[in-house]
């Protein structure tokens, strides 16, 4: 029946019996909005349009056998003299009201929502607590009430409005005191820190949701729906009012400061949301080659910063960077040196895997490409059992033809994953620094260690001594640090695991069995 009413109203609007309001540069017209059995109707402040609107509702009553309850309905007047508004409300037979107001529990006509709109929610939570006998409810029962009732009461608000930090802390404070048997006047004895209580159940905690994080997750769904469902009314309205970026995943940035507060708050989450989204490539005309996460778990501009800096079109889409045969057709600012162009082979591997992969997560199988004459390359890796736990290091050195020159494998005692990777790089570069070479390539699967080595960003203080020695080793050498995926470091990983718990580091002139 709701579909019949919607079609009648749309037909009446198309015949100009009554006119809704138009939004944005595309003039998207909105004549009505429906939510379950509730309907919002829009028309211009003219008596004939109000009469036509009532006649349309009467037609619906005759068709469906249902009745419109005007006694429960309200007419909201915007920029209309009071006398005219009362006359139109009399025609419809409903009450007259003005904005701001409340509709379906949400504030309507509030230009800038603030902390006051959350007061009804906090009062509702407090009202529920007053009806519960907290002194006779077990701690397990209180936990169930928090998860099922208290945590779900604000969901409707949280899915539309950004919750202020102070409000989130007040609600969590109420939950905290209720869990440990306290009240508004005193708090109970906390047996566990609240941050530990909010850790997910699969990690051995109680799994109470953090209010602020849950709010961001609910708001993030609008960013997802905007990219996926632009053909619906909500997507059309946002595109018409704010404009859309070429790939169509979000509205334009320049409207973040002057848009409506609700949508502006949602756009603040766009950066963190985009980093958690993984794209699957089909046509490639909506996915940016450098900026979107479409292969592995990182943006290509971060994985290959040097290639990104010399790319002509940094906003290129995936479909623009490959020809019909799958060949890379990226334009560079200047001619790339051979030792830098080696990284471009990784892009080719990514593209081939994306074309033929049926999985959302892509596992790259890399091969050793020939290097320039006189170049050497070392791959390193650290292995550990427990974090921290017993650990080992391993590495391989190859010449310009991909032949293995030497390898190392050995234990490094008890440490965490970062220390194992740093020490693996240290031993490999220390050995490699004794060679007289034009260029050196160092590769590892630890993104943090590679960033510390090549970007000049200061590593954690406990590694400063090792990195000072590494700088001395590579001084005066033309050295390139590359990040590779774990699948390209399988042999090095095997070497690192081989001698965990043994006595000393061994060096080989071949790949050991």
Image (cartoon, rainbow, N blue to C red):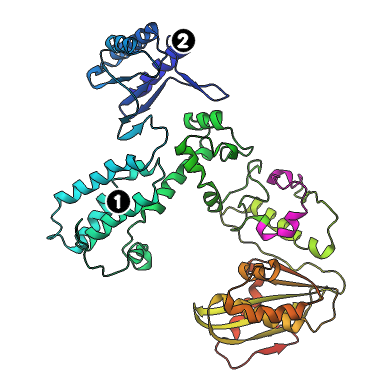
Residue 306 among those drawn in magenta: yes
Name the one closer to the observer, 325 or 49: 49
Q: Which residue is at 60% across, 84% downward?
A: 498
Q: Which residue is at 22% across, 63% downward?
A: 180
Q: Position of residue 401 (x, y in %)?
A: 82, 73
Q: How many marks?
A: 2
Q: Position of residue 392 (x, y in %)?
A: 59, 83
Residue 116: quadrant of the picture: top left
Q: Is residue 513 visible?
A: no
Q: Quadrant of the N terminus?
A: top left
Q: With respect to residue 425, does 312 lie above or below?
A: above
Using a 10 Å C-alpha cutoff, classify the residue at mark 1 as few (fewer than 14 neighbours), some (14 to 19) or many (20 or more). some
Q: Quadrant of the C terminus?
A: bottom right
Q: Which residue is at 15% across, 57% downward?
A: 134
User: Would you say 464 lies left or right of 208 here?
Assistant: right
First to last magenta residue range: 302-324
Q: Marks 1 and 2, how far apart in space?
A: 46 Å
Q: Secondary structure at mark 1?
A: loop
Q: Position of residue 448 (x, y in %)?
A: 61, 68
Q: Which residue is mark 2?
A: 16
User: Would you say 140 lies left or right of 451 here?
Assistant: left
User: Would you say 427 lies left or right of 411 here?
Assistant: right
Q: Which mark is residue 151?
A: 1
Residue lying furthest top in this view?
48
Q: Which mark is residue 299?
A: none
- Label 1 or label 2, whichever comes before in sequence order: 2
């Amino acid at each position: 029946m709701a579909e019949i009413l919607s079609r009648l109203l749309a037909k009446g609007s198309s015949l100009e019996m009554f006119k809704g309001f138009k939004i944005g540069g595309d003039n998207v017209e909105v004549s009505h909005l429906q939510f379950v059995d509730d309907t919002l109707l829009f028309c211009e402040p003219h008596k004939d349009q109000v009469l036509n609107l009532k006649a349309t509702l009467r037609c619906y009553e005759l068709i469906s056998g249902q009745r419109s309850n005007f006694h429960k309905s309200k007419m909201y007047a915007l920029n209309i003299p009071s006398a005219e508004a009362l006359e139109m409300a009399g025609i419809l037979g409903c009450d007259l009201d003005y904005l701001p107001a409340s509709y379906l529990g949400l504030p309507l006509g509030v230009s800038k929502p603030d902390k006051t709109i959350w007061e009804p929610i906090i009062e509702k939570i407090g009202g529920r607590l007053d009806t519960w006998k907290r002194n006779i409810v077990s701690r397990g029962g209180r936990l169930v009430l928090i998860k099922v009732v208290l945590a779900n009461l604000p969901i409707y608000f949280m899915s539309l409005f950004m919750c202020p930090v102070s409000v989130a802390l007040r609600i969590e404070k109420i939950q905290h005191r209720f869990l440990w048997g306290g009240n508004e006047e005193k708090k109970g004895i906390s047996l566990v820190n609240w941050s530990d209580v909010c850790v997910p159940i699969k990690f051995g905690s109680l799994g109470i949701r953090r209010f602020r994080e849950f709010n961001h997750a609910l708001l993030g769904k609008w960013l997802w729906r905007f990219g996926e469902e632009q053909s619906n009314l909500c997507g059309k309205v946002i595109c018409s009012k704010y404009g859309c970026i070429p790939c169509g995943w979000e509205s334009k940035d320049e409207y973040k400061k002057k848009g409506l507060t609700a949508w502006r708050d949602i756009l603040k989450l766009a950066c963190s949301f985009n980093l958690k989204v993984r794209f699957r490539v089909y046509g490639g005309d909506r996915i940016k080659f450098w900026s979107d996460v479409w292969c592995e778990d990182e943006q290509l501009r971060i994985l290959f910063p040097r290639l990104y800096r010399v790319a002509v079109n940094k906003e290129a889409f995936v479909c623009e960077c490959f020809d019909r045969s799958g060949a890379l057709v990226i334009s560079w600012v200047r001619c790339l040196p051979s030792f830098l162009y080696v990284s471009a082979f990784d892009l080719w591997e990514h593209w081939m895997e994306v074309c033929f992969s049926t999985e959302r997560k892509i596992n790259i199988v890399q091969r050793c490409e020939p290097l320039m004459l006189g170049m050497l390359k070392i791959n390193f890796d650290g292995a550990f059992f427990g974090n921290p736990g017993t650990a080992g290091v391993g590495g391989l050195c190859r010449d310009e033809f991909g032949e293995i020159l030497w390898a190392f494998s050995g234990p490094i005692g008890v440490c965490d994953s970062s220390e194992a990777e740093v020490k693996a790089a240290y031993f490999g570069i220390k050995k490699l620094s004794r060679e007289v070479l034009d260029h050196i390539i160092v590769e590892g699967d630890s993104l943090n260690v590679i960033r510390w080595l090549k970007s000049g960003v200061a590593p954690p203080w406990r590694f400063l001594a090792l990195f000072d020695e590494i700088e001395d080793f590579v001084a005066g050498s033309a050295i390139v640090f590359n990040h590779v995926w774990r699948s390209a470091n399988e042999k090095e990983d095997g070497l690192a695991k081989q001698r965990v718990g043994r006595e000393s580091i061994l060096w080989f002139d071949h790949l050991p069995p």
